[in-house]
Amino acid sequence: MSQPLLSVNQLTMRFGGLTAVDAVSFDVYRNHITAVIGPNGAGKTTAFNCITGFYKPTSGDIVLIHKDDTEYKLQEMEDFRISQTAKVARTFQNIRLFGGMTVLENLMIAQHNRLMKASAFTIGGIFNTPTYQRAQEAAKKKALAWMDRVGITDRADDPAASLPYGAQRKLEIARAMCTDPVLLCLDEPAAGLNPKESEELNALLRSIRDHDDVGILLIEHDMSVVMEISDHIIVLDYGRKISDGTATEVRNDPAVIKAYLGVVEE
Amino acid sequence: MNYFIQQFINGLTLGSIYGLIAIGYTMVYGIIGMINFAHGDVFMVGAFVSLITVIVFGITGTSSIALGIGALILVAAISMVIAGVYGWTIERLAYRPLRGSFRLAPLITAIGVSIFLQNFVQATQGARVKPLNAIISGGFTILEGNDFVVRITYMQILIVILTVVLMSGFTYLISKTSLGRAQRACEQDMKMAMLLGIDVNTTISTTFVIGAALASVAGLMYLLYYGVIDFYIGFSAGIKAFTAAVLGGVGSLPGAMLGGMVIGLIEVFFAAYFSSEYKDVAAFSMLIVVLIFMPQGLLGRPEIEKV
């Protein structure tokens, strides 16, 4: 396999006496969907929060490698730079859109940094200079393209909070993609979706994987989603990695079966 | 009737000044949920900076209105920049280190900053009132009744026009530019804005700078309109502008402008028809009434407690 996009090495996160993530290592590859699964309390979300800068890990390395071989040590970066410079985007289990802003504005916000640069930190924005106008148009075009891809074009000017649940999830993914990420982290993207929406989500994630040159890392409880779309699955239990491999390999791993179903004491 | 119209004009002028200050309160509250009690004193500093600039440039009353306006725009620009630096510094030194601390902490430092600014100006500029001769004088009569003449001065026209220009420019900034979008995003969900790569700290600093710049223009207007300032003007003007922000609905920008106008009118009418000594009482009673009966203000959203 080629060089990994994200390399997590001996990641450990302690909260007081509790070790939520214990020396976990794994790799995420470009154009791959990598799923992290595990029973409740396994440390999935904690690991995720470390990668996206919500938590500073107790120890361990989280290294993101761009195409030009620049390496970013995510655990040492100021939180907003993880998105701005390292290009990691994430979504949430409980959707966090800017509910009062329109769908279009939500997608424009994600392109904030490029627009700020084009507007010479807003001075150009006030006077509406041609450079800013061009950047604004380009940003709008990109936003429209993503709205089209997730099928919410007709709702462009509605407040994000007024969208149906399934559409909000897709908008959140579209917004994350508008930041031009190299790594897209999704926290339970299928939670609360009906089977049809779940199907659409699978199609969307596959199309992002195949066409957008990103690596996708997701946490998911819905096994139908995980088993169907993941190229690579990592199983955590009590903060430790217990299995790592393709869907078939993981499914047949006795350690995984034990963690999920328990074993009969003989 | 003529008397009423005259008072209405005076009220709008005063209301413009309050409205410009109120924007600073409401914007900061919107984005970080704190009342910046030092804002009134930034307004006072703006007035002093304007006065100093006027003296340094040797601007005096002139018969040419165009020349006068040009000079004042220069003064406004300089005092906006300097007050902006004050705003940035206050945020950086007094509020940013306390972000994420308990809610009262920045409120207490805000009061501290307010006291500091007052004493700083008192110590450096002296406690006596500072007069300034009218730079733009004159006006014209718009209504002539048999008992009362309604006059509108050029100064009043300038204040109202400048306020309208600044407020529309500012509304454009908030609604159309990427900075405004980022501010609104930070207002709704700061953490999420950060995850989308928005530099939240810079956005908040910019908010303080804009608020301070608008307050300094208000300070300049106050200086020109009343012709005297002292180190203490920030207190009562600040509280009235705060009342205006609460009345309009804290967090709502059109609300701050509307609230400013309403407070200006209330104060002027109270002074005109009841007692000019108690005009401050009228404005502050308004604050109490609004807080008790309409805490969400005229244009504010009702507060929904997040669980």
Image (spheres, coloured by chain):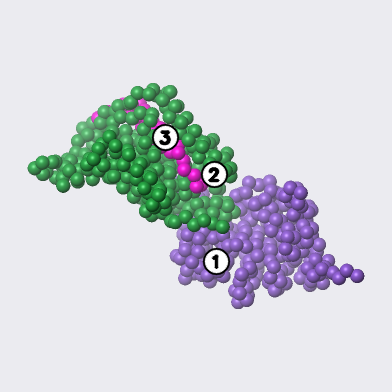
Chain colours: A purple, B green
Same chain? Circles 1 and 2: no
Which chain letter goes with mark 2?
Answer: B
Pointers 1 and 2 in contact (CB under 8 A)? no
Query: On the image, numbered disc 1 is attached to which residue?
Result: A168
Q: Secondary structure at mark 2?
A: loop
Q: Which mark is residue B103?
A: 2
* In front: label 3 or label 2: 2
Instruction: Tell me what residue is drawn at x 62 percent, y 59 percent.
Output: A90
Q: Is residue A133 magenta?
A: no
Nearer the camera: disc 1 or disc 2:
2
Find the distance from the CA under tag 1 to the CA under tag 3: 44 Å
Residue B181: % across, % down: 47, 54
* Residue A196 percent coordinates (x, y): 60, 77
Mark 1 residue type: Gln
> What amino acid is at disc 3?
Asp
Quarter of the image for the C terminus of chain A: give it.
bottom right
